[in-house]
Image: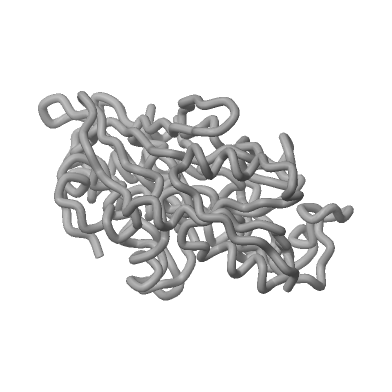
Amino acid sequence: MNRFAIAEARDLDHAAQLAQDERFSLPVIKAAGMDLLDLMKEGLLEPDALINIRRIGHGEIARTGDRMRIHALTTLAQIAESDDVARQAPALAQAAASAATPQVRNVATTAGNLLQRPRCWYFRSKDFHCLKKGGDRCYAVAGENKFHAIFGGGPCHIVHPSNLAVALFVLDASVGVVGARPRTLPIADLFHPPSAGVYDEHILKPGDAIESVSLAPAPRSGFYSIKEKQSFDWPLVMAAASLEVSGNAIQSARICAGAVAPTPWPLPRVAQALVGVRLDDDDAIAHACAASVQGASPMSQNAYKLRLLPVAIHRAIRRARGEEVE
């Protein structure tokens, strides 16, 4: 491991300034540093400065007008345990509760979860100079691709690892960014596919930092992930649903899938197919969920995701209508 400096930031604006300091060639802003430590141990990242923001605050969840604001340093445990989030945006509370282990949730932050790097074993291994690290191929194409993408078309076939991002896609979320160009952008604009840049997964530049996430209340929302071991494994597929209901009929819906594409994957066909369906009509809901796999291109070992994805969406919808779903 290389030598590096540690800088203590006073606030996020100060952290952004430190990240633009010309003395550092590869500064990294960190809070809990869960993924950062893995990347450094794996030899994938060798920063010459770590800018610590962990001590500038403990994060908060607040209401601003008709929206909910979650500070970037709010932990997954704080989100999962918040009565206000559970009441106003249950999909987000369920997504946070589904992530990792209790020990990780107690320290992992909102921004860290959104910006974590993919878990592809070829990317993570120093033995493979894959496309994402400047090589000439995605080894998953002809290799072991059980956990890789069924949507997106490459050229890199990672899946996006963030639980929170999938839920935030159906909650009309936006992200506040500080740095050289402070701005607010829709959550969908934060991420980009490999075809738009294979070396990273988001549009933030050095010196940018997520300050907060804003979202619209959606009491009829739900999240569900399917894992090999439901307790702590990375999801095989995950889904979030948000419903607007008039009487007993679904008036509009937002549906997003995760662990199936290099970015969180909205499913407008499913959302459209749900319009007009009775909330208690499970057959019609299942038929709408089946549309989720249209356009999928499974690889040699991950066609099972075509069967799991409609199930995950259906269970997210059941949670959105208030059911207890194990």
Residue in the foreground of this view, choosing between 234 and 7: 7
Q: Residue at x 51, y 65 (%)?
A: 34
Residue in the foreground of this view, choosing between 58 and 228: 58
The x and y percentages for residue 25 are: 76, 49
The x and y percentages for residue 227 are: 43, 67
Q: Residue at x 34, y 33 (%)?
A: 214
Q: Residue at x 49, y 49 (%)?
A: 9
In the orientation shown, which residue stands out farthest toward the left?
A: 247
The x and y percentages for residue 17 are: 58, 38
- Tell me the quarter of the picture where residue 198 sits: top right
User: From the viewer's perspective, is 257 left or right of 181?
Assistant: left
Q: Residue at x 72, y 45 (%)?
A: 154
From this viewpoint, is residue 196 visible?
yes
Q: How is the image coloured?
A: one colour
Q: How many marks?
A: 0
User: From the viewer's perspective, is 98 left or right of 147?
Assistant: left
The vertical placement of 11 against 163, above or below, is: above
The x and y percentages for residue 183 are: 50, 25
User: From the viewer's perspective, is 287 left or right of 46?
Assistant: left
The vertical placement of 242 against 185, above or below, is: below
From this viewpoint, is residue 269 visible?
no
Residue in the foreground of this view, choosing between 291 and 227: 227
The vertical placement of 271 against 126, above or below, is: above
Q: Quadrant of the N terminus?
A: bottom right
- Tell me the quarter of the picture where residue 51 sits: bottom right
Residue in the foreground of this view, choosing between 295 and 90: 90
Q: Quadrant of the C terminus?
A: bottom left
User: From the viewer's perspective, is 294 left or right of 289?
Assistant: right
